[in-house]
Image: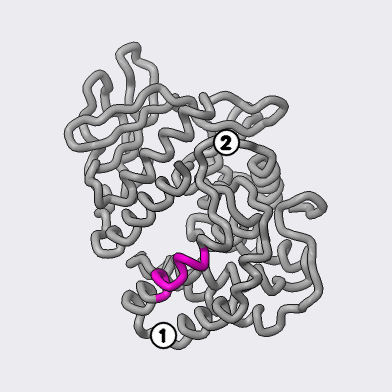
């Protein structure tokens, strides 16, 4: 099941490199039994909105055009499965939860996911120190969870996909050829680093401050479509890749990471290069592309001066993060 899911999403990813899902700028679709209230975000590949049900209670609706070649459609199918498995409850003894699923349906060319509306504030509205503290709480919470049906992406997976993202990155960004080729060479040279690591933990893989909402002393996680079991470092790197965090938060997170480890260790710098190559397969807006290039350069630079001695892993037992 995991292999089938990975292959399915992998094929959708390759096709999405050729077909870019349009950013939704119009109102979300009309949905039978619900009344549209307002858009949730101004720019997204999904249709996102707040609606009211027949009882007049607010719900949150996320929809994607149900084309088989649309990566976001496959992502939303997976997110719906995660929400069904989690049942929307707060895990025992934890202050972190997922939204409660109301229903899923296909209608008017859309796949639609309806969840209970959560009135709270994005974590981005809180002071930087609280953002980092709550972020750590979420990472710690996730690494303790066991969710069935979530794909596992180990070193073999990363190395198998590497040639494809390398070629796509070259095609999409030929002006960055030198850095892309150098990063690819470093990763290939150190392929054993990926194969030697066997511990995989649950990661959100898109954990920016707008995907964490604070309400009633609880933390709710949104956008679960990228969730996977993989290397602990992956969570922090994907967070650093997001432009939805403030520059101050990203700098604080990176500084904390550097303080904990002394310097980004060899494997972390390799994974940072890998994730940056993966991000460069997209045709993202200039602000995001600048961020991806900066992290690619950071990965290359820190690889060159990385130390050989082992360092405590990011986000696992024994590390403050």
The image quarter in which residue 214 lies: top right
Rendered view: 208 above or below 147: below
Question: In the rendered image, is residue 211 in sight?
Answer: yes
Q: Is residue 94 left or right of residue 115?
A: right
Q: Residues within 10 Å of mark 1 (few under 14, many from 20)?
A: some
Q: Earlier in the sequence, mark 2 or mark 1?
A: 2
Which residue is drawn at the image coordinates 54% and 59% (left, top)?
238
The image quarter in which residue 137 lies: top right
Q: Is residue 108 left or right of residue 253?
A: left
Which residue is drawn at the image coordinates 47% and 45% (left, top)?
2
Rendered view: 138 above or below 289: above
Q: Does residue 183 belong to the magenta stretch? A: no
Q: Residues within 10 Å of mark 2 (few under 14, many from 20)?
A: some
Which residue is drawn at the image coordinates 71% and 53% (left, top)?
315
Marks 2 and 1, Cα distance to the nearest angstrom?
39 Å
Instruction: Determine which residue is flagged by label 2.
Output: 147
Instruction: Determine which residue is flagged by label 1.
Output: 177
Q: Which percent across, then down, holds residue 152?
A: 54, 49
Q: Which percent across, then down, holds residue 76?
A: 37, 41
Q: Which percent across, then down, holds residue 105?
A: 29, 27
Q: Which percent across, then down, holds residue 262?
A: 79, 71
Q: Which residues are magenta?
A: 158-166
Q: Secondary structure at mark 1?
A: helix
């Amino acid at each position: 099941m995991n292999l089938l899911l990975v292959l399915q999403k992998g094929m959708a990813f390759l096709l999405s490199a050729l077909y870019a899902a349009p950013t939704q700028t119009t109102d979300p679709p009309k949905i039978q039994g619900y009344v549209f209230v307002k858009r949730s975000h101004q720019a997204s590949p999904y249709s996102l909105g707040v609606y009211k049900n027949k009882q007049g209670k607010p719900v949150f609706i996320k929809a994607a055009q149900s084309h088989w070649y649309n990566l976001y459609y496959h992502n939303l199918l997976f997110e719906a499965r995660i929400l069904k498995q989690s049942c929307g409850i707060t895990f025992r003894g934890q202050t972190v939860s997922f939204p409660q699923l109301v229903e899923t349906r296909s209608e008017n060319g859309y796949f639609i996911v309806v969840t209970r509306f959560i009135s709270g504030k994005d974590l981005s509205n809180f002071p930087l120190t609280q953002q980092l503290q709550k972020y750590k709480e979420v990472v710690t919470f996730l690494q303790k969870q066991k969710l069935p049906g979530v794909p596992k992406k180990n070193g073999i997976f990363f190395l198998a996909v590497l040639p494809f993202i390398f070629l796509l990155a070259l095609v999409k960004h030929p002006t960055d050829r030198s850095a892309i080729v150098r990063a690819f060479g470093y990763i290939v040279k150190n392929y054993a680093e990926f194969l030697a690591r066997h511990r995989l933990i649950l990661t959100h893989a898109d954990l920016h401050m707008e995907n964490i909402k604070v309400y009633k002393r609880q933390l709710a996680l949104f956008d679960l479509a990228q969730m996977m079991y993989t290397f602990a470092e992956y969570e922090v790197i994907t967070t650093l890749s997001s432009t939805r965090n403030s520059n101050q938060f990203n700098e604080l997170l990176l500084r904390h990471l550097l303080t904990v480890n002394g310097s980004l260790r060899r494997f972390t710098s390799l994974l940072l290069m890998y994730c940056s190559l993966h991000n460069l397969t997209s045709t993202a807006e200039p602000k995001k592309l600048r961020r991806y290039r900066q992290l690619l350069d950071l990965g290359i630079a820190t690889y060159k001066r990385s130390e050989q001695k082992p360092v405590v892993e990011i986000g696992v037992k024994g590390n403050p993060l």
